[in-house]
Image: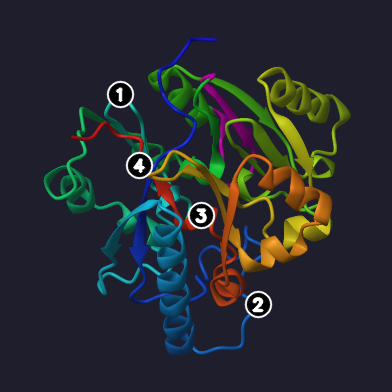
Amino acid sequence: MTSSAESQLANAVLMIRPVRFFSNPLTAASNRFQGKTSLTADEQQSAALAEFNGLAAALERAGVDVVVVDDTAEPPTPDAVFPNNWISTHADGTVVLYPMEAENRRTERRQDIIDGLAQQHGFHVRRVIDLSPHEERGHYLEGTGSLVLDRVNRLAYACLSSRTHLDVLGDFAQQLDYDVLAFDAVDSNGAAIYHTNVLMNVGETLAVICLQAIRDAAQREAVQKSLIDSGHALVDLSYEQLESFAGNMLELRAKDGGRVLAMSAQAHQSLTDAQRAAIEAVATIVSAPIDRIEASAGGSVRCMLAELHLPRG
């Protein structure tokens, strides 16, 4: 694999403050985690806004640089709180834009946000790679939802689903100089898991993954071997923990250089004492309750954070 100067951990994240958040009917067919709410759309928005502000504040208290941008009221983008699906940024100044399955998610891609990162926050954007034309052929790759990146070793883990297609994976890999480890993963009912970041995350020295979700023994062994060979200790999750969004974590770098592992309160509570100890040996856990966001939209903390790896200053 090609060596890279890129750090695995970002020290800044982009978050999009929700304006018209609600459970998106256009994503429900492929996301079995969403729609578990009886709240009205207005109640969902009110709850999501409070939870968003709580998470952003918790990250800032932990020393993570949080760039907050408000969503727009029009057109309605109920899932805009999950920016990691449409944008990824990279240490060489590259921004990647991604093709998304739901039509009402495609307007989440906003050039003004990219411009603002440069003009208002001092990030340097050297080039933009736009993969969104794949939407015209019905093929998708939903950012770092579909991709769990080992940035140091230039390796992209991806479970295939209606939102993650091999040809777009190949396009990403060729343009960003990554190798791809693609596999199949299913939930406890045997349905395809819609995003890779639901079942795994890769930090500097620790990887958290629900191995039993990879039913094919050869694929499971390949993923496990790759993680271990790249120097990662493993925290293996149960299906119950997966369904509590324990796979949807993100390791970040605080301003003091320390590691922070961000997750939801539900995910944190699902961990065993031994798993918590393994995590706390390498990172400070930062958690916040986002139960309403998780129940309505079927995404959690990692989905809400688009890492900012762009050069700055």
Mark positioned earlier in the residue sequence (4 or 3): 3
Residue at mark 4: 308
Residue type beneath disc 1? Asp
Q: Residues within 10 Å of mark 4 (few under 14, many from 20)?
A: many
Secondary structure of the residue carrying tag 2 is loop
Observer able to see residue 192: yes
Q: Tag on residue 36?
A: 2
In x, y percent, where is residue 178?
Answer: 49, 19
Residue 20 position in % (x across, y down): 36, 77
Mark 3 lies on a secondary structure that is helix
Q: Identify residue type, mark 4.
A: Leu
Precedes in sequence: disc 2 or disc 1: 2
Front of the two marks 2 and 1: 1
Q: Please, what secondary structure does the residue beneath circle 1 have?
A: loop
Identify the residue under disc 1. Answer: 92
- Kindly give the residue lying farthest to the right in the view shown: 217
Question: Within the magenta stretch, is there residue 159?
Answer: yes
